[in-house]
């Protein structure tokens, strides 16, 4: 004996389905009463989840009860790349003013798809006002340069990161530079430029780390602001 039922899928969509015999052989179960408000005549059914295998049923979730039980974090020590700081900034990186056109180079205006987050630092300016900058590194379509992108974070949106502006601030030819070396060199270039041009003081907080670890960020800052 066949019957037509209204099947509610996991996505909340509904479709009529004609079945014959036991609905369970189609993987269908009745929708509990009160779960869905429905005034039609069709029988409401839904697909039941796939039955778990014995291995899945036996597997238990281990909830860490102390910090000792937490998985060890991956080590991201980038101190080995600090020797690049001795590279002359006069002949290597190039500081880029906003919307500046660099002859022969396609400077990206937006974060490239392959961009990597370096770090986020903060300068408290006055009560209730903090300058927060997030730094990314990436390349353009030619893959001949590393570019440093600086994104100003909205300090009034602490839980959902929003960028007030995005700009490319420095670049360096790839050459033999690894991405970590280029990130260190470009950060030094940008911070050195700010110090010399606007007398920008050292940042106060490293609020997040990505490609470079906390110690490496502070080592770069000590080079720019030795006092």
Image (cartoon, rainbow, N blue to C red):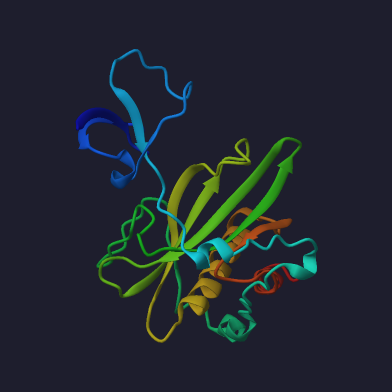
Corner quadrant of residue 120: bottom right
Which residue occupies the foreground of this view, 145 or 8? 8
Left or right side of 13 for 223: right
Q: Is residue 119 above or below residue 27?
A: below
Determine whether, in the image, residue 54 is placed left or right of residue 99.
Answer: right
Quadrant position of the N terminus in the picture: top left
Q: Is residue 114 visible?
A: yes
Picture residue at 73% right of the left edge, 62% below the top = 64
Q: In the image, is residue 106 above or below residue 30?
A: below
Which is nearer the eye, 210 or 133?
210
When asked about the image quadrant of residue 79, the answer is: bottom right
Inspect this view and state whether residue 227 appears.
Answer: no
Residue furthest to the top: 39
Relative depth, front residue between 137 and 159: 159
Q: Residue 16 is drawn in which quadrant?
A: top left
Residue 81 appears at what percent x and percent y?
58, 83
Residue 197, position as x, y percentages in the image: 58, 57
Residue 130, percent across and down? 67, 43
- On the picture, is 89 further left or further right than 38? right
In the picture, measured across the screen, residue 169 lies left or right of residue 17, that is right
Name which residue lies at 62% across and 75% down. Answer: 74
Rendered-image quadrant of the C terminus: bottom right
Q: Report the residue at 37% width, 84% height from top.
A: 175
Count the marks. 0
Q: Toward the viewer: 93 or 163? A: 163
* Residue 158 locus on image (x, y percent): 63, 41
């Amino acid at each position: 004996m066949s019957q037509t039922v209204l099947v509610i899928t996991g996505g909340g969509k509904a479709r009529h389905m004609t079945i014959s015999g036991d609905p369970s052989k189609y993987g269908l179960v009745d929708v509990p009463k009160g779960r869905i408000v429905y005034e039609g005549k069709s029988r409401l059914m839904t697909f039941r989840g796939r039955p778990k295998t014995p291995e899945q049923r036996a597997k238990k979730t281990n909830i860490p009860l102390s910090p000792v039980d937490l998985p060890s974090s991956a080590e991201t020590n980038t101190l080995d790349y600090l020797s690049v700081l001795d590279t002359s900034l006069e002949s290597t990186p190039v500081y880029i003013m906003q919307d500046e056109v660099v002859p022969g180079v396609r400077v990206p205006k937006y974060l490239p798809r392959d961009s990597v987050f370096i770090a986020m630092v903060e300068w408290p300016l006055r009560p209730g006002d903090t300058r927060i900058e997030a730094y990314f590194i990436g390349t353009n379509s030619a893959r001949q340069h590393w570019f440093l992108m600086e994104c100003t974070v909205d300090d009034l949106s602490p839980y959902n990161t929003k960028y007030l502006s995005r700009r490319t601030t420095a670049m360096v030819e790839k050459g033999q530079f690894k991405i970590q070396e280029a990130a260190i060199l470009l950060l030094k270039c940008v911070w050195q430029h700010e110090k010399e041009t606007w007398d920008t003081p050292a940042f106060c907080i490293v609020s997040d780390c990505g490609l470079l670890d906390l110690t490496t960020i502070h080592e770069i800052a000590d080079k720019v602001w030795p006092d």
